[in-house]
Image: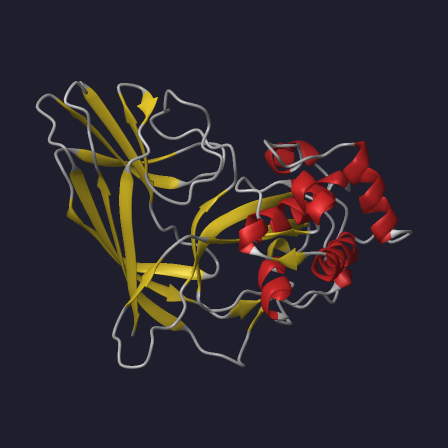
Amino acid sequence: MPRIAECPAPVVNTASTAKWYEIDDTFTVTAIPNTCRELNIWSPVIPASPYQRVLDMAVAQAPGVWSVGRETEHGNAMIHARLSAGLPQEVTFRIRYLVERIPVAHSLHTACVRPLETPALFDRSLRAEQFVDVDDKTRILAHKIVGAETNMLNQARQIYDYVVSTLTYDAAQQSWKGSTEHALVCSVGNCNDIHALFISLCRSLGIPARLVLGQALEPPAPGQESCELCGYHCWSEFFAPGLGWVPVDASCACKYGTRGLFGNLELNHIAWSVGRDIQLQPTQQGEPILFFAGPYAEADGRPHLKIRRSVRFTEI
């Protein structure tokens, strides 16, 4: 692996300071059938990353015996409980966190970037996924966007600019599954549709790219000490040799016109999981999870979708 001369190291973004959040994730599996013999419950655990540190966490409430595992493809951590015999009609989990969001931005210099030497190491982030296409249509479009550009960083930036300039954010017109086809045909969607297109176009050029599922912690209204969240937010990361995994948020750029989100994230973004089509740990009996944004349950091996969740946070 050749050394790269005069390649600056990543720097701390001194324009902003770190933020700290207390997060309370409470979810209840409801309407458990009287005939249920075994109930399995999984939920993502907030991970550490280059942009966030989990300073403290605790399971404040849980029914019976639980464990924390990690699936092998993406490395997502999750809490799991298997309950049986004499189940109540509902069970509740409560997990508390203290998370520091670190204001780190990449120094994005093309001189740092070299070709991807071993694509097989990134196979999971280069191939098609459910509703995320890598085919002739996406390859033709991706090559049209980048033209003669060969530097992977510049290619990713051109794809980002294309997505931001051609798509409109509208959660009311989303695909509900994060779809490349929906983004291409409708030119509108939510954060998942927008990043499905970005990921597809990157992968179509041999640039590893992946989805990050999380939440944007919007500040509470004046006079309120905490805020309850609904839904989720997602962004993308692409891999450039010499730089590593680089975050981008084309969705917030489309929705708010926010600049500076290629290689950076707003400080209110907290990640919960990475990737799509996820096999849980221990493995669920149902289909792979399209994306792991919150709790999932199976009653006697069948998906049980009656889950009530409340995520509250306080910025400290």
In the displayed structure, 145 sits above or below 136; it is: below
Provide residue 138's location: percent of width, then percent of height. Answer: 77, 39
Q: For this rendering, which residue is in front, 295 or 5?
A: 295
Q: Kindly indicate the quadrant of the structure image that contains residue 24.
A: bottom left
- Taking the spot 16% from the left edge, 42% from the top edge, the residue there is 62
- Residue 135 in which image quadrant: top right
How is the protein colored in the picture?
secondary structure
Q: Residue at x 54, y 81 (%)?
A: 15
Nearest the viewer among 24 and 174 is 174
> Front-most of 193 and 278?
193
Residue 4 in sight here: no
Q: Position of residue 265 (x, y in %)?
A: 54, 65
Q: Is residue 128 left or right of residue 64?
A: right
Residue found at the very far left of the displayed protein = 86
**9 is higher (above) or lower (below) than 298:** below
Residue 71 visible in the shown view: yes
How many numbered marks does the figure carry?
0
Q: Name the outermost residue toward the right.
A: 148
Percent from the top left, x then y, of residue 137?
80, 36
Residue 278 pos. (x, y %) = 47, 32
153 displayed left or right of 210: right
Q: Nearer the viewer, residue 171 or 146?
A: 171
What's the residue at 67%, 68% (across, down)? 8
Q: Quadrant of residue 90?
A: top left
